[in-house]
Amino acid sequence: MFQSMHKPKFQLLPLTTAVTSVLVPSPQVMAQEGAMLEEVIVSARKRTESVQDIPASVQALSGEDIAQMGARGMEDFTRFMPSVNVLNYGNGSSSVIFRGATIDGGGYVAQATSSVYLDEISITSTGAQPTIRMVDIAQVEALAGPQGAIYGSDAQAGTLRIITQKPQMNEYSLTLDGYVRTGSDVDGSYDGSVVANIPLIDDTLALRVVGFTAEDGGFIDNVLGHTPDYVSTPDSPHDWSGMDWGELDNSEFVEDDVNHSKVDGWRGALRWDINDSWSATAQYLHQEVDNGAYGFMDPYVGDLKKVSFFDDYSTDELDLYGLTVEADLGFAQLVSATSYYERDTTWGQDITAYHHYWSGANWSCAGGLDPDVYYWYYSTPGGVALYNGAYCLAPTATGDYLSTIQEIGYQERFTQELRLSAQGETLDWLVGLYYEDAQNYWESDFADVTNGDFQQSVALDYYESMDEATYPNATHAWDSYSDTSWEQWAVFGEVIWHLTDKIDVTMGGRFFDRDTSNAYYVQRPNTRDDLDTYPNGAEVHETNDKEFAPKIAVSYRFNEDVMAYMLYTEGYRPGGTNRVRGQPFYPNNYEPDIMTNYEAGIRSTIFGGAGRLNLTAFYMDWEDYQLELVDPSNQQCPDGGPDSVAGVCGQPWQVSIGNAGDAHILGVNGEFDWALNQNWTFGMNAEWLEAENDSDLTDQDLAIYKGDNLPTVAELTGSAWLNYDRPVSFFNGSEVFARLQWSYRGDSSNIIDNTPRSANNPQLTNPSNNIGDLSFGLRADSWEVSAFVNNLTDERAIYTTGSGAFEYGAGSSIDGREHVQKNYVNRPREFGIRLIKRWGG
């Protein structure tokens, strides 16, 4: 439990007195007459309103903002949203984190703490989120803090909304947009799109179609190297001195710029204004992403270099269907939002160093054990007693090999939401019903031998000896299948009571009921030819969650320009069931974890409408957070032999999720925008966070202590930008424009576990980074031409460092490479030009 001293007590009068004294415009206001900021209108609370009127933390970027900053993916525009951190893995997928609410630093089993929406369609995924190409976007809204009352169980720490442009009635328009870019350390890239708005029936029916294609050139080189042959970490219990490793190389796979990415897709929306009261919009998105390797470099190999023993790849195919019906019923507005989401993924990656870690364990292929205690299997080719021969992929127990993992995945989700809302002089209200039916399935081929024949391996001999069977069709050591499905019902609502002309009271909440089931199955070795048929006999585990997420807010408007508020919200991440095999140590099911948010803020319009200054302070309690970790039951059993369950031990290796501990997140956020005059606008924002663990977790080899920072969370983030626009007399009334932008992110740790560098999976630091960009050009009503430089100083910004793979201690004496480390980095400096041509509109 958290001590009360940790919770800030917000006192309205001293705070507002201090701030409003700063905000009152003085006679020396520098903004010229007529220089005004545009009002920012959002729909974050399922109604249209000014962002300055919302008693919550909402930041919005317009489509024009996104175009000016040259954003292509989520990691590009969230640099300028300090509450949001996107970990980009460089293969069309990423993790979205609000206010530092993450424990695993890139886990792949636990549910996300933040939700992502495209219009009314949730695209939130377990593990990495799909990346939406930012073409013909109207607005992006970042809702920081728990959004459980309106957006449900996936919005524990925040919600990111990407809102597309909608069809326009009676308006023909066509826009072509293309640019190319390149750099000294990166392969060439291009991006092209076409947007057409077509009225079909006057005042009744309109169609908007978007098509896009892009290729992001690679910048990571796979260079010549050799397999690891020694353990470089002193704390490792492994001894590889008896292994015949280190002379195999990756010459077959050496190539420059291996992390290229190709994106193709199209989007369509059809709007039907049925009559003055009813309308319907149907939309569809299809997107295909075809990638090379993941976007990480190894600093022990060199800048923008790595050593891989496979042509890594990934594909991601996404289909989204949506139907939104809106009606004016007189007494209220009705919205029905129906959506269907389908995603197919494949990926393959080299795991030679990872697999050598386990193969070189003194209870696997290294042998040398006392057969009276550890004896399980005797390897005839190697003439040695082995505890577990499953990792010995060569023809002899100590032989060298190359290995990969390859996986396919399938996700689908159907949702239906109905909501009624109305606004009145005294009360504004909203009520809604929500239904969700979803499935997340994947199957993984682990330990594929890429330089030999699995039929000749010690691993196959081990399995056939243990099972007293033959597997003539087996091609690799391990197949696993996971099928998770859930069904959820929810009812939600919100009431805003205009108590006086200055005071509003908001009360709301959401009750949800969710059933989750998981079936997990492993075959060792693989023996089935049809990988699309789920195996019979997989044990199914089920769980049910029922939770209520409340919301309470009070706002006070000092005048038309200044509003202060206090907010209490809760967010839940749903519980679930683990992928269970054997008799694991941790429970089969885990419970929801709870995020409680205490927040206060001020929203102010200053300088007579030429500026905005918004300040927010918050404190979030995180109870029983879900931690992804290896179940300790896989340890060997020195007493009673390998079949013993005492303890528990001798069970299959598996990742589990448990409700491990508590944490808190304390933060302050500030945003400032200023139209200096008719030509210059300036903006900046920053967020300071204290995101710390509040529990000592030292069982089962964990080293997590009270006061430890949460992973991938920077203490300070910030950004600033300066825009210049000026009409010119040539080219028929065109204008010149320029933008200089900068972002900063402080350093962070890659994992929460305080594992030292002397161990195989250490806690490492993601260094702080500064990234600057410059663009300038000339535009008119129907065309635009510009040039740009991305990453002006050629900064190597590390999004995160690969964790949990036990590769760090794998050294190569031939290459002089002490460790294996995966730094996921941003793109190097690039120069480019952009052309836009418009017709109609």
Image (spheres, grey):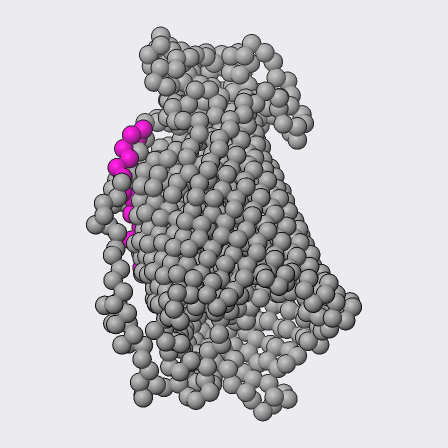
Q: Is residue 87 magenta?
A: no
Instruction: Locate the N terminus by quadrant.
Output: top left
Q: Residue furthest left?
A: 5
Q: Residue at x 35, y 10 (%)?
A: 640
Instruction: Locate the C terminus by quadrant.
Output: bottom right
Which residue is nearer to you in this view: 24 or 265? 24
Residue 253 versus residue 121 in the image, above or below:
above
Report if residue 498 is visible in the image: yes
Q: Residue furthest bottom?
A: 729
Q: Residue at x 55, y 36 (%)?
A: 486
Residue 225 versus residue 392 in the image, above or below:
below
Which residue is nearer to you in this view: 150 or 467? 150
Q: Residue 424: image x %, image y %? A: 51, 66
Q: Residue 612: image x %, image y %? A: 39, 74
Q: Residue 341: image x %, image y %? A: 62, 47
Residue 58 relative to residue 465: left or right: left
Q: Residue furthest top?
A: 372
- Total tally of numbered discs in the picture: 0
Q: Residue 402: image x %, image y %? A: 52, 32
Q: Residue at x 56, y 89 (%)?
A: 728
Report if residue 248 is visible in the image: no
Residue 542 relative to residue 204: left or right: left
Residue 244 versus residue 197 in the image, above or below:
above
* Range covered by the magenta-colored residues: 686-701
